[in-house]
Structures are given as structure tokens and as C-alpha cells.
Image (tube, grey):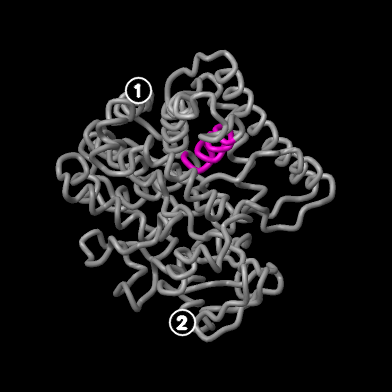
Amino acid sequence: MRLDPFSDYYSLDPAATWRRLLSTAAPVTFDAQLGVWLIAGHDNVRTVLADVARFSNASTVFPLTPLTAAAQQVLAEIDAPRVAVTADPPQHLRTRAILRSLFATTAVRAQDQWGALVTARVDALVAELPPHGDFDLTSFAAQLPLLVILDVLGLPADRARQVHRWVGDFGRIVWGNPTPDEQLAYAHSCLELWRYCEAEVTDRAESGEFGPGLIGDLLRYRNGVDANLTVAEVAALALYIVGAGSETTAGALGHALDHALADPQRWALLAGDEHYLSLHVEETLRHSPAVDGWLRQTETDVILDGVRIPAGARCLVLIGTANHDPAVYEEAHVFEPYRPRAGQHLAFGSGPHYCIGAALARLELTTALRALGRSMPDLARADGYRRQFKPSAALRQHTTLPVQRPAAGRCPVAHDHGAGGSR
């Protein structure tokens, strides 16, 4: 098999596999064990992501691992309509246009709309971190995006723990390799998440008290007219935004912290150098994309890079290979914030499905890194730390990120082991 996304080898260093695919294998090839076509390389990945006519996004959240009949039966109860991320034209264009009118998609708008909200959440979470000793930053990285996206949607924060479990299980059943028992449990979590979003939106729509956040804005846009948006479409938008807006940003924040703490000079720059802070975030997104794969399905027979892919074929689009393509990035395995062309990365996709939450994610990353750098200038990765990621075909998240506050007088020492040759 050319790609084993659930192996220890891949979980320790996915970039090593990306380099092998780019250097020794055909960039477009069928993986019989995964049952998908693998698409590698910057140009190929960008072409597929931008081509919604030939590469459908409608099955992008259908699980990669074949499901049992019991799990399929549970998932069949999720009657969410196709919107935005799971839709193709014209439905995709319609619902995305509505989102764009309400959801900040530029840095300036994001700062105006959510800057105070994000800062408040960051400051509260930083204040809860231990003042000294050893602790793990993965909890911080997971909590911040979840709380922010709940605030953005207008959902109550007191359900955060439950929503976190549901969203995590959603990612595990789509991108993981769960056992039959796990499949059934994860399928029930997905259904519970849908029923929760559906109930929240329906209650507000029926009461006429639309409430705060994006859900309220969508219901006000709907204005009781199904031709504008149906209640089910509003609930489906909430479902996919809470899923896409938390786990992915949590992964990106973990990567950004890891790369910053690998070098005391990088960590020091985060506190006061806004230019470096921006470069650090972009290089993190390039070097360590939180979503390093995406599923598409061919609508017709397609010739890509000289290879014929039949109609109806599922394709695993390897974003990680695009961001590590030596044809675009010199020494792509090296984490280098000052590199040229870093902004050409495909971490947020390309074309009509470019991530609508990119500006919000960047705002969360820069706000969190700046606050941590200023409040904990002596923070360092724990002795003996080795980078490892949760097994997944697409969602790259750290298993742990142990850190320490060094004793007075001791200089932090960088410990950079594993995962993609960062230095």
C-alpha cells in the first residue's frame, strides 16, 4: 500500500510519506487498500480542489473506512440538507453567498466582528494555565477554538464538553479507522450533534426569538421564508461550522505552538513582533496543515496529470503533499517563517470551497500565540518531548504537547524531534 494513514510510521512523521509520494511514486494513483485515488503535488491538488464541475464535494464527509450496516443505519437518520461544505453548485453557491454576507472573511472584518470575543476567550484560558511546573497545552489548543465557534454561532458554552465529544467522534468516523463497535458509538455521536443543532435552530425559529450569533443572523436572513433559507438549512450550516471550526483550528494551534516552542528565539518574537507572528502562522499552515487531506468524487472520467480516473471514483486529495512540493518550496520539510511564497499554501483549500473560516482561524492563532508569548516568556517544551499525531487520514492533531516553566536562571532548550524535519 502506498499510504497507510493509520500506522505508527505515518502518525509520527506524515511528511516523510509526503516526500516519498512526491519523489518516488506517480502523483496520481489508485490505492487498492484504501479504495481511493491518491492525488499528490501542488498543481494536481490545486486543480482538483478548484474544479467543482468534475470533482464533487458532496461525499466529502462520507467515511473513508467502510461502515457496518448498524453504523450506516444510524447515520442514515441524519437528514441534514447539503449546504456549503457538502454541496455542489448551485446549492453550494447559494448557501455560501449567504454565509459570506454574514460571516467575516477578511482580516479586518474578522477583527472588527470577533476580535474582542477571541481576546476575551484567550485571556480567560491563559489565566487558567498553571503559573509554574509542567502541564499540557493540547487542552488549551482544543478549548479555545471550540469556545470561540460556539460564541460565533450563538450556542451556549455550557454544552462545550459534550459538543467537543460529538465533534471529535465525527472526525474519527469520517477520517479514522474505527472498529465496528467504535463506528456505532461514533455514528450515535454524529446523530446527537445533528439533533442538538436541529433543536437549537428549530426552537429559535418557532419562538421568533432568534438570539445572538450567526444562527440568529441566519434566521433573521431567513425571515420566515423557506425560499431564503429553510430551518433545516440553518441547522445544517450550524452543524458543519461547529465541526469544521473547532477541530481544524485546534490542530493548527497545536502545530503553531509546537513550532514556536521548538526555538526560544521564535517564542520570544511572538510577544512583540507582529510581522514575525503573521509569518509564523502562515508557515505553520504551510508546513503542518491541520487538514492534510480532503475527499472528492469524480463526476465524469477525468484525465489528471496524464492518468485516467474513472467517473464515480473517490479521491483523497493530499494537501500535505501540495504544501511540501519541492517544485514550489525549496527545502519544504524545513520550518522557515521567512521563506518566499509561503502564502501559496493550500491549507485552506482553493477555489469555490476555499475555507470560509480562514480569517477567523488566523485571528485565533495570532491572538493566542501573542498572549501566551507575552504572559509566559519562559515557557518551553518539556524535556524528552517527541512529536506524535493522532491516527487519521486527514485531520492532523497532536496527541500531547507537554511544556514546562523552567526554574529561575535556566535557559529554555529547544527539543525538536520527529514530524517533518522542522528546525
Tell me the amino acid under the disc marked 2.
Ser
Which part of the image, by quadrant, shows the C terminus?
bottom left
Residue 387 in sight here: yes
Start and end of the magenta stretch? Answer: 233-245
Residue 241 colored in magenta in the image: yes
Residue at the spot x=55%, y=78% of the render?
28
Q: Is residue 409 above or below residue 224?
A: below
Q: Is residue 338 left or right of residue 105?
A: left
Q: Name the foreground residue: 303 vs 377.
A: 303
**Element at label 1:** helix
Residue drawn where x is 40% and y is 57% of the image: 347
158, 56: nearer the viewer: 56
Quadrant assignment for the N terminus = bottom right
Q: Is residue 52 above or below residue 302?
A: above
Image position of 32 (left or right of 37): right
Which residue position is annotated with label 2? 23
Q: Which residue is mark 1?
A: 124
The residue type indicated by label 1 comes to Ala
Q: Position of residue 296 (x, y in %)?
A: 58, 62
> Mark 2: which secondary structure?
helix
